[in-house]
Amino acid sequence: MAQFRITIVLCFALAAAPLPAFSHNLPLSVSQALKQAGIPKSAAGIYVHEIGAAKPMLAINASVAMNPASVMKLVTTFAGLELLGPAYTWKTELYASGILNGDILQGDLIIRGYGDPRLNLENFWLLTRRLRQTGLREIAGDLVLDNSYFDTPIGDPAAFDGKPYRAYNIFPEALLVNYRTLSLRLIPRSESKTVRVVVDPLPDSLDLSNNLKLIDGKCGDWHDALGADIRTGMNGNSRASIAFNGVYPIDCGEKTLLLGLHDSPTYTFGLFRQLWTEQGGVFRGKVRLGTAPEGLLPLEVHESPPLAEIVRDINKFSNNISARQLYLALGMTSGAAASPATGLINDTGSGRTPATLAKSGAAIRQWLTSRHLHFPELIIENGSGLSRNERISAANLGGLLLAAFQSPVMPEFVSSLPITAVDGTMKKRLNGTPIASQAHIKTGSLEGVRTMAGYMLDKSGRRVAIVFFVNHPKSGNAQSAMDALLEWVYKRP
């Protein structure tokens, strides 16, 4: 995917204004944990700053531009809350193109999307139900999908990590239904030494072969152990197949595997037809891509949950797809630089040109400038952190956290972050320690990258912003050092 570079500069410390050097103050526990993990101090960027203090208490390589992984979502979600407002919603519109004759549509049904990040199975069911409640029963024409609100490059889903069917590699779409994914629940049955596989939704275009064997042992990398043979349609064939021929450790318990196996028209058509039929509807046609005619009034309009709710999904569970959908929405705001935190109007249907990555990058740059935040090293590609190219320094991300804490949208922003030992990606971290429930921390993970950033309430009741980046081949061993930093901040005098 083409990337938008906010400013092209040298990405390391030589390009940035120097910060005071506090490397000699690196806590001994953190230093020892890094050494034991085989990670040199030069591969870590650390920034710790108490809210309201004039200077940071700790800054290690803090001006070095580093890959933040999913911690980049903090930039996207804070920008979203300020530029769009916590109550912002996305629309999905249904149009009848043809003649309505009683309860029969002699023509096509058009679904026009505007980038809703939460048009999941439940909400898509609600959309079809509301359509059915209009009195429409039979659709004689086709299902027309209007994706024209986004103008994004067509990328290779295998380019990032060679796993094209994993849900996190799905690209943004203006009409993205249920993230275009199948949810496969793996349910171990110890009495029969088998594993039940439940697919939801279960499309007619999927062939499933389950030869999994339940074994004793630790869970480990259960994805690879499944021995999944996945094949998708070729030469216009819309069918897909999954064959599980591996093993599944009983210690894993119940797990869910999310896969994207069908293209958007096939997936959306299959799900719509299934839900429509379940509600007593009749559908006669096929599916095709198209655009809604200008001037046609919508038959039904569905609104997403508010942005304040969606950012919780993005940050607590590191939802890459929703983050990318939100990032594209940022470029369609009006007056982004002039009035941060005011909640701008929804641009849906205003006749503007489509959303692009370039527009979103420009909106981020304007917004940062309006807040007097200068991040010359920042490279933002898609806003989710699922990128080998995105960069930001620990100090500047720390500055963003300090600004967010003084923002009118602070409550929504902070509450969207995972709480240590309570929920989200931090649910299993630091259980049974004094730090449990005392920090809101977003985590990030890529091959060669481990990161965290957020807020800690220390034992004296002081709020502290914390950023810790590790970019190193052994970054997978960095968790103990990160936990040691959280403990040090919590216990400091």
Image: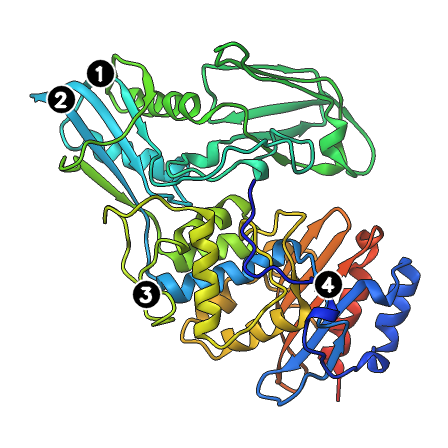
Q: Position of residue 84 (x, y in %)?
A: 36, 61
Upstream in the sequence, badge 4 or badge 3? 3
**Nearer-the-camera pick, 342 or 64:** 64
**Nearer-the-camera pick, 455 or 189:** 455
Q: Is residue 311 above or below residue 249?
A: below
For disc 1, the marked residue is: 141
For disc 4, the marked residue is: 469
Mark 4, Cα crowd under 10 Å, few <14 / some 14-19 / many 20+, is: many
The reply to whether discs 2 and 1 touch (Cβ–Cβ < 8 Å) is yes
**Nearer-the-camera pick, 305 or 180:** 180
Q: Disc 4 on helix, strand or loop?
A: strand
Instruction: State the CA–CA distance, disc 1 to disc 4.
Output: 54 Å
Upstream in the sequence, badge 3 or badge 2? 2
For disc 2, the marked residue is: 98
Name the amino acid type tagged 4. Answer: Phe
Upstream in the sequence, badge 1 or badge 3? 1
Q: Residue at x 33, y 20 (%)?
A: 288
Name the amino acid type tagged 2. Answer: Gly
Mark 3, Cα crowd under 10 Å, few <14 / some 14-19 / many 20+, is: few
Q: Disc 1 on helix, strand or loop?
A: loop
Name the amino acid type tagged 3. Answer: Gly
Instruction: State the CA–CA distance, disc 1 to disc 3.
Output: 41 Å
Can residue 76 be seen here? The reply is: yes
Instruction: State the CA–CA distance, disc 4 to disc 2.
Output: 56 Å
